[in-house]
Image (tube, rainbow, N blue to C red):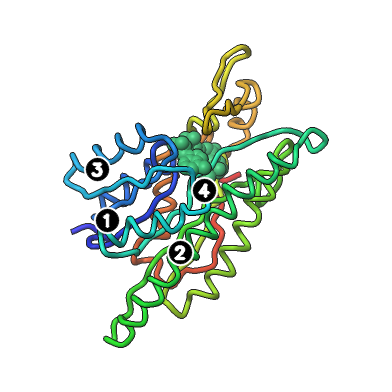
Amino acid sequence: MGKLAGKVALVTGSGRGIGRSTALKLASEGAAIVVNDMDEGPAAAVIDEIKSGGGKAVACVGNVAAADFGDRMVKTALETFKGVDVIVCNAGYTLDTVVQKMSDADFQTMLDVHVVAPFRLLRAASEPIRLLAKKEAAEGREIFRKVVLISSVSGTRGNPGQINYSSAKAAVTGMTRTMAKEWGRYKVNVNCVAFGYINTRLSQAFDAGDDVSIAVEGRKVAAGIPKAIADAAKSMIPVGRAGTPDEAADSIYLFCCPESNYVSGQVLEVTGGS
Ligand SMILES: NC(=O)c1ccc[n+]([C@@H]2O[C@H](COP(=O)([O-])OP(=O)(O)OC[C@H]3O[C@@H](n4cnc5c(N)ncnc54)[C@H](O)[C@@H]3O)[C@@H](O)[C@H]2O)c1
């Protein structure tokens, strides 16, 4: 029996990278997974992978920034698996430029994806969680639920060229601490992982001339880090390399397992020691 047997986990942006590894890790510990991604193909591939390993998974495809997304994700979990036990708000990307070139629209988009979307998802989950917690309390049972919000050292420490993303990721730490205080009464642990350099599509090193852009609803968005900057960043990491998506997922898992039931309102920087 896995540590999350019988639990239902909602993981946004779980078609690739850290979210994918998190979905697979939680599934390997027995959780049924609601897989979200704005790209249908990667979401379907993760679901196949979970099912072929004997797990349970269902898709809720779409952009987390859509106004109805939170309600759809929670409804999918309740209708398919009859529960909401773990929520990992991971979906996101970057729209970098320096302050003088940053448009209102690109600033707002990062707030919408990284702050408003998790807010709406948690708001959508609040009533089902309240009712479940009330029922469990009446039965004399103490069942812990888990929320893990994903931030970045760009949010906790700042990063040039990311006024939109770093502001949004900083807001996530405030959301974490507030929700830990609001939801303690429902036995929900709310924590945050702020990553340093994790090797994913978002942070891939590229040579001059390479096109590593990603598509976001038809818009071409720059991704990756120029190789010289990536190498310099990696050389500053005490453990000597960037993290893997699986290592990132393991740190998220620490906040999802029963051993962390008395840990809430924390922001954990996962940086390889820097
Ligand atoms: N990779 C890093 O070094 C790093 C560092 C700090 C924080 N993060 C954060 O980790 C999270 C995951 O990033 P990653 O590195 O795994 O990136 P990734 O691009 O490898 O994977 C992200 C996945 O989320 C999906 N996604 C992105 N925006 C979405 C949206 N609006 N709606 C639905 N799906 C969406 C993408 O399609 C993709 O499949 C992000 O919140 C990112 O800001 C990453």
* Label 2 environment density (alpha carbons within 10 Å; few <14, some 14–19, many ≥20): some
Q: Tell us which disc is closer to us: 1 or 4.
A: 4
Residue depicted at 48% across the width and 74% down the height: 183
Tag 4, which secondary structure?
loop
Q: Which mark is residue 50?
A: 3
In the figure, 37 relative to 215: above or below?
below
Identified by mark 1, the residue type is Ala
Q: CA distance from mark 1 to mark 2?
A: 20 Å
- Residue 149 spot, x, y in % from top left: 51, 56
Rendered location of residue 217, percent (x, y): 52, 33
- Depth check: give the residue in front, 193 or 270: 193
Q: Which residue is mark 2?
A: 124
Q: For the residue marked with disc 2, what is the amino acid?
A: Ala
**Residue 243 can be seen in this image:** no
Q: Which residue is mark 4?
A: 66
**Residue 101 figure quarter:** top right
Label 1 secondary element: loop
- Which amino acid, mark 3? Ile
The extreme top residue here reads 209
Image: 228 above or below 48:
above
Report if the CB atoms under discs 1 and 4 are less than 8 Å apart: no
Q: Residues within 10 Å of mark 1 (few under 14, many from 20)?
A: many
Q: Is residue 49 left or right of residue 153?
A: left
Identify the mark nearer the N-term, 3 or 4. Answer: 3
**For marks 4 and 2 on the same chain, the one whose residue lies earlier in the sequence:** 4
> Amino acid type of disc 4?
Ala
Residue 85, percent from left and from top? 35, 64
Q: CA distance from mark 3 to mark 4?
A: 26 Å
Rounded to the nearest whole Å, what is the CA distance between mark 1 and mark 4?
A: 26 Å
Secondary structure of the residue carrying numbered label 2? helix
